């Protein structure tokens, strides 16, 4: 039966494409009007004509191509057909109460229970969802009904039993081809896989995704993975002056605009051979990091990237894997392979391998979003970019994570220790005026280290920003993040003394 299913699925792409095209030419009374041509005026997305009123009748379910034996009671081919027909009819009519009866109504959902829709086109990304509860999915259905979304059956592909103790009772997996269309989506054939509870006649999981594969998906997650892998890379370009468009700082060491963040340092810079990155025997550079995912999203992720200013490779590996690949698929976090804290943040430990310095962009695709994170790899350790004080002389156990040239006469450093994140800019052109907007205090001689101005934190009183010079360099410090008690005026003084000595100026002179 499996080989027969694969043969049928290989024909589905051809069959459903013909069906999709023929539907656009329908002119029968009550039929859906033909789709309009895509709107090409940027930045609008392609649209299709909404369904006319009254709502067109629901097309009948197709006859299943397969009639497997051994289906559990309550999940015969006829009963499954009736349940799916009820789902499609309720979805298209926007009858949420009728639809609600098809989902579990009490108790917590199983870890593998979720309801997701993934579009492969950039214009349709926002029409997707990943919901971990029926109520969240029903809210999504209501929003899609307002946009005139309809799902029409095209072809049964596969029905098979999942009757094992690990799935919590007698269940079946059903794979179908549907035609999906809406005001904000051109008509397109999609693949849907459902996991049904036979005794209860309920939908326990659902995955809908654009798919052109001729391989029968093994699970709803595989449907989503297939759709995500079809999305093209849409990475930024370097600016006219060749500057790397590094992603902005978000919190802690994380950069990105969410819902996914990469904790690489506040400036989006890593030093090859520095504290985060280790050189490998084959000459590549590898560093471990964890992708942080907002509590708002727990669905699958597809991570891919490349160098923007050259041909160097960027390869990815999941935790514990020695094999790095060009792209990394992370399954839904609720399936237990990721770490989730009490606030709902998900952490995915991974490793990134680079072949050399450059500007790198990583695209992260989720069910209902697409984002790009850009960072820069710098040749040399931080101490090779700028002579640094001994680590033991830095207060609070601070570590210099990165150092890079931010201009011809300036070096920018990122310093970190657990609850403390600091950005320090070092001017190499010599002393200059101490300018600090909002400075609360300035002294000409700060215990023998030179003039200093600082701005106190409004709530805790510690120096939130400071400027000083040591007669050879000018410094501008900003505390990006600090927990109460993790930074003080004494710590600032110790840091000033450490860098003053590193620049070749004797302490106290």
Image: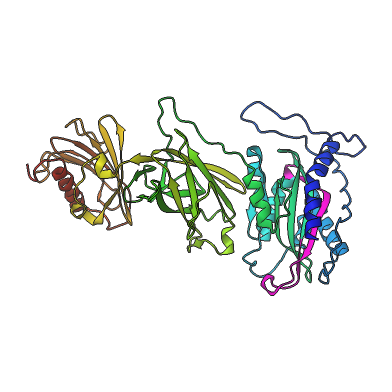
Residue in front for this viewpoint, 68 or 393:
68
Image quarter where the N terminus lies is: bottom right
Q: Give coordinates of residue 88: x percent, y percent.
A: 80, 53
Residue in front for this viewpoint, 303 or 491:
303
Q: Give coordinates of residue 275: x percent, y percent.
A: 32, 51
Residue found at x 71% / y 66%: 105
Residue in front for this viewpoint, 315 or 475:
315
Image quarter where the C terminus lies is: top left
- The residue lying furthest to the left in this view is 509
Residue 148: quarter of image:
top right
Residue 395: quarter of image:
bottom left
Residue 247: quarter of image:
top left
- The residue lying furthest to the bottom in this view is 165
Left or right, 184 with respect to 263, comes to: right
Q: Which residues are magenta?
A: 146-173
Q: Magenta span has 73?
A: no
257 relative to 417, above or below: above
Residue found at x 25% / y 41%: 384
């Amino acid at each position: 039966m499996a080989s027969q299913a694969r043969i049928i699925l290989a024909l589905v792409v051809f069959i459903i494409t013909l069906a999709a095209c023929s539907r656009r030419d329908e002119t029968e009374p009550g039929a859906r009007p033909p789709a309009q041509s895509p709107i090409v005026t940027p930045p609008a997305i392609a649209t299709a004509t909404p369904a006319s009123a009254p709502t067109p009748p629901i097309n009948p379910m197709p006859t299943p191509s397969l009639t497997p034996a051994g289906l559990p009671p309550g999940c015969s081919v006829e009963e499954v057909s009736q349940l799916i027909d009820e789902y499609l009819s309720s979805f298209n009519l926007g009858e949420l109460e009728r639809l609600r009866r098809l989902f579990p109504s009490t108790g917590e959902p199983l870890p593998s229970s979720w309801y997701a829709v993934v579009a492969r086109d950039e214009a349709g990304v926002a029409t997707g969802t990943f919901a971990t509860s029926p109520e969240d999915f029903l809210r999504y259905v209501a929003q899609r009904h307002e946009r005139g979304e309809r799902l029409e059956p095209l072809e049964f592909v596969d029905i098979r039993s999942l009757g094992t103790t690990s799935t919590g009772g007698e269940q079946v997996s059903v794979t179908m081809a549907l035609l999906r269309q809406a005001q904000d989506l051109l008509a397109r054939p999609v693949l849907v896989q459902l996991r049904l509870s036979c005794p209860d006649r309920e939908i326990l999981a659902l995955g809908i995704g654009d798919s052109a594969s001729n391989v029968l998906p093994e699970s709803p997650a595989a449907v989503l993975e297939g759709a995500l892998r079809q999305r093209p890379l849409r990475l930024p370009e370097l600016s006219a002056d060749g500057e790397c468009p590094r992603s902005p700082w978000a919190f802690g060491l994380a950069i990105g605009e969410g819902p996914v963040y990469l904790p690489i340092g506040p400036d989006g810079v890593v030093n090859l051979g520095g504290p985060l990155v280790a050189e490998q025997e084959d000459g590549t550079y590898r560093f471990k990091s964890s992708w942080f995912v907002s509590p708002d999203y727990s669905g699958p992720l597809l991570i891919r990237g490349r160098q923007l200013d050259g041909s160097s490779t960027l390869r990815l590996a999941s935790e514990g894997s020695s094999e790095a690949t060009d792209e990394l698929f992370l399954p839904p976090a609720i399936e237990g392979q990721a770490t989730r804290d009490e606030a709902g943040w998900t952490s995915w430990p991974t490793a990134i391998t680079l072949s050399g310095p450059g500007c790198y962009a990583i695209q992260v695709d989720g069910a209902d979003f697409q984002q790009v994170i850009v960072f820069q790899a710098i040749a040399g350790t931080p101490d090779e970019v700028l002579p640094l004080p001994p680590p033991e002389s830095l207060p609070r156990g601070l570590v210099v994570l990165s150092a890079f040239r931010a201009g011809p006469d300036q070096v920018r450093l990122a310093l970190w220790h657990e609850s403390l994140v600091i950005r320090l800019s070092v001017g190499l052109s010599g002393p200059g005026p101490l300018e600090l907007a909002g400075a609360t205090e300035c002294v000409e001689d700060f215990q023998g280290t030179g003039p200093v101005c600082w701005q106190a934190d409004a709530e805790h009183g510690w120096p939130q920003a400071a400027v000083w010079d040591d007669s050879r360099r000018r410094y501008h410090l900003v505390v990006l993040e600090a927990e109460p008690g993790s930074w003080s005026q004494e710590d600032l003084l110790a840091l000033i003394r450490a860098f003053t000595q590193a620049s070749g100026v004797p302490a106290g002179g």
